[in-house]
Amino acid sequence: MSKIDLNALRLNLDQIKDIVTAPMSFEANLKTATRIYFPYRIKINRLRAIATKAIAATDNGTVQGANSTGDSTGGLLTFTASAAIDTEATAVTPTTNNYVEAGSYYKLTSAKATSGGSCLVTIEYEKA
């Protein structure tokens, strides 16, 4: 019987990079401030989004990223008015309020003056 070297198989938890996704809406009564909780301290590296329902033609739709202390500078995703389904918002890199403490959350807040549309947001993060 051969031996397995557990040290060779051990995952270095200090180097974990991962993603989490969250559906967001620009529809009336469905706009939210969605909190995504993390069990360990993390750093948000990038936010991406894709339209899952066309954005209404009247005005732009935005999703703002924030940690528990406030909005992330550089953390605003924007869909232009009339963006078609499968349109990607320009990816952004938050530079402030981009760390989340263990047991706390990163918040995504959708906003649009006139209703219409939805998207899927991807948060790229690493253990910090």
Image (cartoon, grey):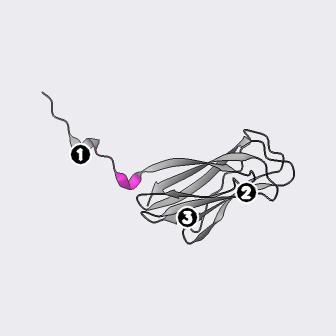
Q: Position of residue 53 (x, y in %)?
A: 74, 41
Side (left or right) of 105 relative to 2: right
Determine whether label 3 and label 1 are within 8 Å by CB. Answer: no
Q: Mark 1 belongs to which amino acid?
A: Asn
Q: Residues within 10 Å of mark 3 (few under 14, many from 20)?
A: many
Q: Is residue 3 above or below residue 89?
A: above
**Residue ranking furthest to the front:** 29
Q: Nearer the viewer, mark 3 or mark 2?
A: 2
**Callout 2 amino acid:** Thr
The disc, 3 or 2, on the residue closer to the chain's N-terminal end is 2
Q: Does the magenta-highlighted stretch encompass residue 89?
A: no
Q: Residues within 10 Å of mark 1 (few under 14, many from 20)?
A: few
**Label at residue 7:** 1
Determine whether 88 is above or below 47 in the image.
Answer: above
What residue is pinned by disc 2?
Answer: 62
Judge from the rendering whether residue 17 lies leftward or rightward of residue 29; answer left or right.
left
